[in-house]
Image (tube, helix red, strand yellow):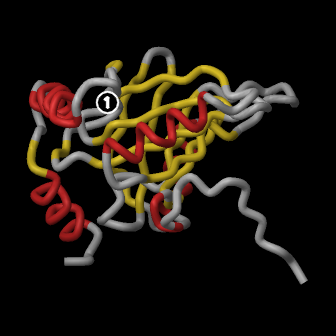
């Protein structure tokens, strides 16, 4: 019989942190994107460059901007982790701050970064073995991805959301998340 072990559950509500998506590195971005579209019927929601990496965002659920992120840059030699990130969703800025504060207090956590993507506000950090983790919450806006700018989570909730909205509004396809969601439902046949 297995046991569930919780160590100091600072997030009392089990649903306060829910798994959302993962990203992994690939050698041939176009081939892998085609595979996930054609074989597993994922829909491509966005694509673009973020620094040297090319990203393709894929989803089978119109409620999720992406469930898989394919990232270029996987080297041929062994010993490279193909996992780009593990991502979990929270409901608000306060919970995001709580996770950030708890994580940075943990020995071995490194590379804490707080950013906005316009359509989300995220923290990224490395676990003790260097795996990247993202914890985020969705904003009420859509803007095409990838997009990332630093954000100061120690500012008020209103200031953090205002920065995210201002960034999202700079993008040519800015729209309310509800409008984008209705279009994704239509495109994915889930309307």
The residue at which mark 1 appears reads as 116
Give left or right: position of 183 versus 71.
left
- In the picture, the quarter occupied by the N terminus is bottom right
Residue 171 vertical position relative to residue 176 in the rendered view, above or below:
above
155 with respect to 162 (left or right)? right
* Foreground of the two, 89 or 74: 89
Q: Residue at x 52, y 62 (%)?
A: 12
Foreground residue among 63 and 183: 63
Quadrant of the rendered image containing residue 115: top left
- Percent x, y for residue 165? 14, 33
Q: Name the secondary structure under disc 1.
A: strand
| Residue 5 sits above or below residue 106 on the image | below
Q: Residue at x 13, y 59 (%)?
A: 178
Relative to 183, is 36 on the left or the right?
A: right
Q: Position of residue 13 (x, y in %)?
A: 48, 66
Q: Position of residue 6 (x, y in %)?
A: 72, 61
Q: Quadrant of the C terminus?
A: bottom left
In the picture, measured across the screen, residue 169 lies left or right of residue 19, that is left
**How far from the left and from the top, in percent, is residue 94?**
35, 43
Q: Is residue 30 visible?
A: no
Residue positioned most to the right: 1
Residue 33 seen from this side? yes
Position above or below: 21 against 123: below
Q: Residue at x 40, y 24 (%)?
A: 49
**What residue occupies the far bottom of the structure in this picture?**
1
Question: Relative to the observer, which residue lies in front, 176 or 11?
Answer: 11
Say few, some or many: other residues with alpha carbon within 10 Å of mark 1 (under 14 / 14 to 19 / 20 or more).
many
Q: Residue at x 44, y 53 (%)?
A: 89
Q: Tell me how many marks there are.
A: 1
Q: Quadrant of residue 23?
A: top right
């Amino acid at each position: 019989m297995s046991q569930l072990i919780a160590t100091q559950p600072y997030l009392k509500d089990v649903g306060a942190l829910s798994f959302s998506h993962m990203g992994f590195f690939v050698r041939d971005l176009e081939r892998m994107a085609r595979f996930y579209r054609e074989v597993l019927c994922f829909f491509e929601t966005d694509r673009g460059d973020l620094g040297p990496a090319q990203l393709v965002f894929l989803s089978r659920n119109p409620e999720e901007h992406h469930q898989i992120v394919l990232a270029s840059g996987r080297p041929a030699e062994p010993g490279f982790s193909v996992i780009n990130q593990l991502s979990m969703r929270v409901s608000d800025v306060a919970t995001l701050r709580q996770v950030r504060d708890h994580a940075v207090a943990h020995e071995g956590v490194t590379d804490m970064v707080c950013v906005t993507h316009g359509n989300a506000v995220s923290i990224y950090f490395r676990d003790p073995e260097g795996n990247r983790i993202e914890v985020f919450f969705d904003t009420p806006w859509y803007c095409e991805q990838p997009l990332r700018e630093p954000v100061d989570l120690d500012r008020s909730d209103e200031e953090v959301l205002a920065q995210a909205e201002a960034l999202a509004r700079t993008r040519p396809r800015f729209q309310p998340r509800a409008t984008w969601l209705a279009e994704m439902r239509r495109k994915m046949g889930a309307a």
